C-alpha cells in the first residue's frame, strides 16, 4: 500500500510518516506543492494525505489534479483551518475525508485504513485475525464462527483497535473517535474503561484471545503478537 | 418618531400656542377700539343733550332725536357733577329679553337749578357681532395659512432630508462581510456631503479592520494548531516505545493532555470570535427536537452508564432558522453540560414547545451565581479539568440569534431555558 503525505511542516511530516510506516505502509512525503504534483504525476498511490495550506499553492488544486489523473486514489485532507468552507469545498471536489489539526495519529491511521478498505474491496471485505472474523459493512463480528453481539460503540472501538494494532492508543484518541471532537466529558475515561471491559468480556466469553492490554496512565493497546 | 413627523408636530404645537396668545390679544385690541368709539359717541350725545338742556332750560324729548335709549330723570335737589360709563344689561321691550348695553350715566345740575341724571344706553349686539365676524375671518385665514405652511414645510423637509434618508438606507443595508462597498448618493447639501464622506471613510476602515482581524484569527489558528499538532503527534509516537517506565508514561500523558486542552481552548475561542464576526451566515430550517434526539442517542451510553433517566416532555417541536453547525454545537453543548454536571442515578428533563425548550438536570449545589456560568472560563470547582467555554459558546450562539437564555438553580435542579421566540413577543 502506497501513501503520499503532502505536508509542508517537516517535523509533522516525518512524525506522520514514521507512524504510518510502522503499519506496513510505504509512505512517501512531499513538502511542497510542486514536488507533490510531480509525484502524483509519476506514481500511483492508494491514498494521498494532503494539507490544504501549502507555501507555494493550495492543496485543493492538488486534489483536483489527482481526481483527473487517478480517480481511484483515496484522499484525506488535513488542515489547521477548521473552516467549514474548506471542508465543504474539499469534500465537494472529491476528497474522502477531512481532519482538523491537531489530530491523533491513530485517528489518521484508522481513516487511511478505512478508505483503503473501501476503495479496494468495494465494501465487501472481511477482516480475519486469528479466531476473529469481522464483516465491517454488516457490523458483524464472529469469534470461532460464533457471532457476538456488540453495541455500535463497542464495534467502533474494536474497529479502531484493529486499525491500530500493536500500538498504544491514548484514552483521549479513543474518546474523540467514539464521541467526536466536541465531547469534553470530564469522566469520559470511565466510559471508555467500561466499554473496553464489556468488549473484552464478550470476546473472552467466546473463547477469544484477550488482545486488549492496559497501558498504565495513558491508554490501551491491542496486541496481536 | 420620524424626523418629519417630529418637526411637523413641533410646528403645529408652537403655531397653535402663538395663535391662541395672538388671538386673545387681537380680540382685546379690537374690542377696546370698538368700545372707545362707542364711549366717544356716548359722550358726544351727552354733550349734545347737555347743550340742549342749557339752551332751552327744559327737558326735551330726546327719543325723537336719537335712536338710543335715553333717559333723563329730573330731581328737585341739585346733584353732584359726575359721569361714568359701564357695561350692563337692560330689558328690551320689543324683544322681551335682557340685552347687553354700554351705558353712560351722568349727573348734573342745570335745569332751573334742579338736578338731573342722564343715562344713555347703546346696545352692544351689533358691535359684538362685528367683532365676532372679524375674529372669525382672521381664524379662518390663520388656519388656512397654517395648513399651507405645514404642507409646504413637510414637502420641503422631505426633499431636503431625502439624501439623508438614502444614506440611512444604505447604512442599514451595509454588511461588513460582503465585498460590496457602502454606496452613498451625492448630495448638494454640504453637511450631508460631509456626513457621507465621514461614513464612507468609517466603513472602509471598519472593513479593513474586520478583514485584518479575520485574517489574524485564521493565521493565529493555523500557527498555533501546527505546533500543537507536532507536539501531539511526537508524543503519540513516543508512547509507542517499549521501554518507557511508568513515571515517564505519566509525564508524557500530562503533556499530552495539556496540549489537547490548549488546542480545545484555541478552537473554542476561535469559534466564539467567528460567531462574533458573523462568519456563520448560511442558515437553514432546524428542528431542535430532532437535534436533541440525535444527541441524546449519541450520548446514550454515557447516560446509561451514569444511570441518568431522560424525561421527554415534548409538546411541539421548536423549529427555527439558524446555521446548522451552530445549532449542533448549541444542542450538543447543552446536553453534554447536563450530563457532565449530573449525578449518578440523576435525571434530565427536556421540555419543548414551539417557543423553545428547557433542559433541567439534577446536579450539585453551585459555588457561584448561576448566570456567572455563562461567562468564559467560569466553572464550578467539581469539573476543573473542563475548558470552561461550553456555556459561553452556548450563550454567544443564543445571543447571535436573539434567543433568550436563562440559567436557574432550584436546590439541586439546574435548568437552562432557551426561548427561540422571546416571551415578550410571543403571544
Image (cartoon, grey):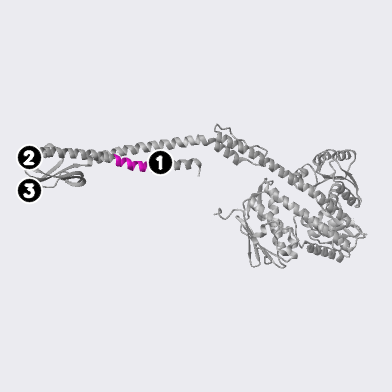
Residue positioned 88% across, 39% down in the render: A35
**Disc 2 vs disc 3: Cβ atoms closer than 8 Å?**
no
Label 3 Cα neighbours within 10 Å, binned few <14 / some 14-19 / many ≥20: few
Which residue is nearer to you in this view: B60 or B422? B60
Marked residue nearer the N-terminal end (2 or 3)? 2
**Chain ID at mark 3:** B
| Left or right side of A213 for A175 | left
In this figure, which residue is indicated by the disc labeled 2? B57
| Left or right side of B199 for B253 | right
In this figure, which residue is indicated by the disc labeled 3? B76
Q: Quadrant of residue B201?
A: top right
Q: Quadrant of the C terminus of chain A?
A: bottom right
B16 falls in the magenta region: yes
In this figure, which residue is indicated by the disc labeled 1? B15
Residue positioned 35% across, 41% down in the render: B22
State the image coordinates of residue A175 (x, y, percent, origin top left): 79, 58
- Measure the alpha-carbon separation of dots 3 and 1: 62 Å
Label 3 element class: loop
Which of discs 3 and 1 lies nearer the camera? The answer is 3
Q: Quadrant of residue B371?
A: bottom right
Amino acid at each position: 500500500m502506497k501513501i503520499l503525505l503532502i505536508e509542508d511542516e517537516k517535523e509533522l511530516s516525518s512524525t506522520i510518516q514514521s507512524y504510518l510506516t510502522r503499519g506496513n505502509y510505504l509512505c512517501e512525503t512531499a513538502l511542497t506543492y510542486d514536488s507533490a504534483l510531480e509525484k502524483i504525476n509519476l506514481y500511483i498511490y492508494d491514498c494521498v494525505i494532503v494539507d490544504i495550506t501549502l507555501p507555494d499553492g493550495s492543496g485543493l488544486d492538488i486534489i483536483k489534479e489527482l481526481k483527473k489523473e487517478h480517480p481511484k486514489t483515496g484522499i484525506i485532507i488535513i488542515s489547521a483551518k477548521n473552516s467549514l468552507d474548506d471542508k465543504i469545498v474539499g469534500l465537494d471536489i472529491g476528497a474522502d475525508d477531512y481532519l482538523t489539526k491537531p489530530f491523533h495519529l491513530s485517528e489518521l491511521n484508522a481513516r487511511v485504513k478505512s478508505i483503503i478498505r473501501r476503495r479496494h474491496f468495494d465494501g465487501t471485505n472481511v477482516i480475519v485475525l486469528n479466531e476473529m472474523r469481522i464483516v465491517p459493512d454488516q457490523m458483524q463480528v464472529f469469534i470461532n464462527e460464533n457471532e457476538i453481539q456488540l453495541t455500535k460503540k463497542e464495534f467502533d472501538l474494536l474497529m479502531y483497535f484493529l486499525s491500530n494494532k500493536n500500538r498504544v492508543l491514548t484514552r483521549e484518541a479513543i474518546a474523540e473517535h467514539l464521541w467526536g471532537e466536541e465531547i469534553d466529558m470530564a469522566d469520559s475515561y470511565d466510559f471508555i474503561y467500561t466499554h473496553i471491559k464489556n468488549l473484552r468480556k464478550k470476546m473472552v466469553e467466546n473463547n477469544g484471545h484477550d488482545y486488549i492490554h492496559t497501558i498504565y496512565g495513558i491508554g490501551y493497546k491491542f496486541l496481536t503478537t | 418618531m420620524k424626523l418629519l413627523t417630529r418637526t411637523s408636530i413641533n410646528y403645529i404645537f408652537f403655531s397653535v400656542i402663538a395663535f391662541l396668545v395672538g388671538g386673545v390679544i387681537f380680540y382685546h385690541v379690537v374690542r377696546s377700539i370698538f368700545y372707545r368709539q362707542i364711549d366717544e359717541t356716548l359722550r358726544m350725545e351727552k354733550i349734545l343733550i347737555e347743550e340742549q338742556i342749557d339752551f332751552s332750560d327744559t327737558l326735551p324729548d330726546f327719543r325723537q332725536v336719537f335712536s338710543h335709549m335715553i333717559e333723563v330723570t329730573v330731581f328737585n335737589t341739585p346733584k353732584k357733577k359726575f359721569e361714568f360709563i359701564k357695561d350692563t344689561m337692560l330689558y328690551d321691550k320689543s324683544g322681551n329679553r335682557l340685552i347687553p348695553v354700554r351705558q353712560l350715566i351722568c349727573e348734573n345740575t342745570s335745569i332751573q337749578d334742579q338736578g338731573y341724571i342722564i343715562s344713555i344706553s347703546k346696545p352692544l349686539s351689533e358691535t359684538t357681532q362685528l367683532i365676532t365676524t372679524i375674529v372669525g375671518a382672521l381664524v379662518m385665514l390663520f388656519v388656512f395659512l397654517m395648513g399651507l405652511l405645514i404642507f409646504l414645510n413637510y414637502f420641503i423637509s422631505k426633499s431636503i432630508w431625502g439624501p439623508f434618508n438614502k444614506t440611512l438606507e444604505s447604512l442599514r443595508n451595509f454588511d461588513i462581510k460582503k465585498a460590496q462597498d457602502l454606496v452613498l448618493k451625492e448630495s448638494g447639501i454640504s453637511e450631508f456631503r460631509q456626513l457621507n464622506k465621514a461614513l464612507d471613510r468609517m466603513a472602509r476602515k471598519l472593513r479593513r479592520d474586520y478583514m485584518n482581524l479575520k485574517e489574524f484569527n485564521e493565521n493565529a489558528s493555523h500557527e498555533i494548531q501546527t505546533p500543537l499538532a507536532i507536539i501531539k503527534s511526537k508524543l503519540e509516537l513516543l508512547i509507542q516505545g517499549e521501554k518507557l517506565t511508568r513515571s515517564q508514561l505519566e509525564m508524557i500523558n500530562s503533556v499530552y493532555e495539556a496540549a489537547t486542552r490548549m488546542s480545545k481552548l484555541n478552537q473554542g475561542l476561535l469559534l466564539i470570535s467567528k460567531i462574533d464576526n458573523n462568519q456563520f451566515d448560511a442558515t437553514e430550517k432546524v428542528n431542535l427536537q430532532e437535534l436533541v434526539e440525535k444527541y441524546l442517542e449519541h450520548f446514550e451510553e454515557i447516560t446509561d452508564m451514569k444511570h441518568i433517566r431522560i424525561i421527554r416532555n415534548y409538546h411541539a417541536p421548536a423549529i427555527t432558522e439558524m446555521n446548522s453547525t451552530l445549532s449542533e454545537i448549541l444542542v450538543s453543548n447543552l446536553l453534554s453540560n447536563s450530563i457532565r454536571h449530573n449525578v449518578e442515578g440523576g435525571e434530565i428533563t427536556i421540555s419543548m414547545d414551539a417557543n423553545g425548550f428547557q433542559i433541567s438536570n439534577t446536579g450539585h449545589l453551585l459555588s457561584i451565581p448561576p448566570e456567572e456560568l455563562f461567562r468564559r472560563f467560569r466553572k464550578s470547582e467539581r469539573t476543573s479539568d473542563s475548558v470552561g467555554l461550553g456555556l459561553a459558546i452556548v450563550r454567544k450562539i443564543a445571543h447571535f440569534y436573539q434567543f433568550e437564555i436563562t440559567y436557574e438553580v432550584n436546590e439541586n435542579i439546574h435548568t437552562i431555558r432557551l426561548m427561540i421566540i422571546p416571551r415578550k413577543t410571543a403571544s
